Image (cartoon, rainbow, N blue to C red):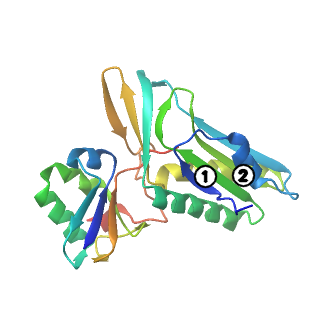
Amino acid sequence: MALQKGFVITDKEISIQEVVDKVMDRNAGAINTFIGTVREMTKGKKTLYLKYDAYVPMAEKKLQQIGEEILKDFPEAKVAITHRIGELAICDIAVVIAVSTPHRADSYTASRYAIERIKEIVPIWKKEHWEDGEEWIGDQLEKTPYPSGSPTKEELE
Amino acid sequence: MIKVLLFADLEEKAGVREIELSNSEMKVLEVKKYLIEEYPVLKGIENALPAVNEEYATSDTVVKSGDTIAFIPPVSGG
């Protein structure tokens, strides 16, 4: 069997089980999965569907970087992340993160770190389509979207 | 030749994802200035982060022929 890619951008439906299987480990006592889904209502506005786009090769590299960052804190962790792009309907799965660790607390911490970091450094964009319009969404964290690990805003001047 | 990649609202405004520059060597800042001059609709590029060959870069990073420079608008994955 070919070596499985742990950090993937795909335009296909994500199989949660497939992502989970990648982090199975005899030393794991916990597997934490985060499943990001498409929400209908955002700030009172009804989304009809979403469109995700990505700079695919760089996005896969940055997902891998997140995995490496997690390993620095939790050397025994195994991490796999798959993010979907293309047109997604309400309730569709946009992202699946699986983290296995020997003990449960670390798996929660690492999983949380991964999703927050995705929103900071991974070149993926979401376009919301409403009944009365559409817009590319940026900076969901409402702060500088690129902290450590990438240039600061000043460096852009 | 330097390859420029645009995404999300930048791509939509420009109407293209890829632009080719015939220059053999430029700083990121020069690429930015050139694009804003040539394509005034790309003013939003000021808020985008440059990436050279798939790694975040700074305004001083030198881009050479054969390199790819991408402009990354604020991301919204997850």
Looking at the rendering, which quadrant does residue B25 occupy?
A: bottom left
Looking at the picture, tell me which residue is in the foreground, A101 or A106.
Answer: A101
In this rendering, would A107 be left or right of B27?
right
Q: Amino acid at mark 2?
A: Val
Q: Secondary structure at mark 2?
A: strand
Label annotation for residue B41: none
Determine contact: label 2, label 1, CB under 8 Å.
yes
Residue depicted at x 52% and y 28%: A39
In this rendering, would A74 be left or right of A69?
right
Local packing at callout 1 (Cα closer than 10 Å; few below 14, some 14-19, many 20+) is many
Of the numbered discs 2 and 1, the one sitting upstream in the chain is 2
Evaluate whether residue A61 shows in this view: yes
Q: Chain of mark 2?
A: A
Q: Chain of mark 1?
A: A
In this rendering, would B46 be left or right of A85?
left
Label annotation for residue A99: 2
Q: Is residue B1 above or below residue A1?
A: below
Q: Residue furthest right?
A: A26
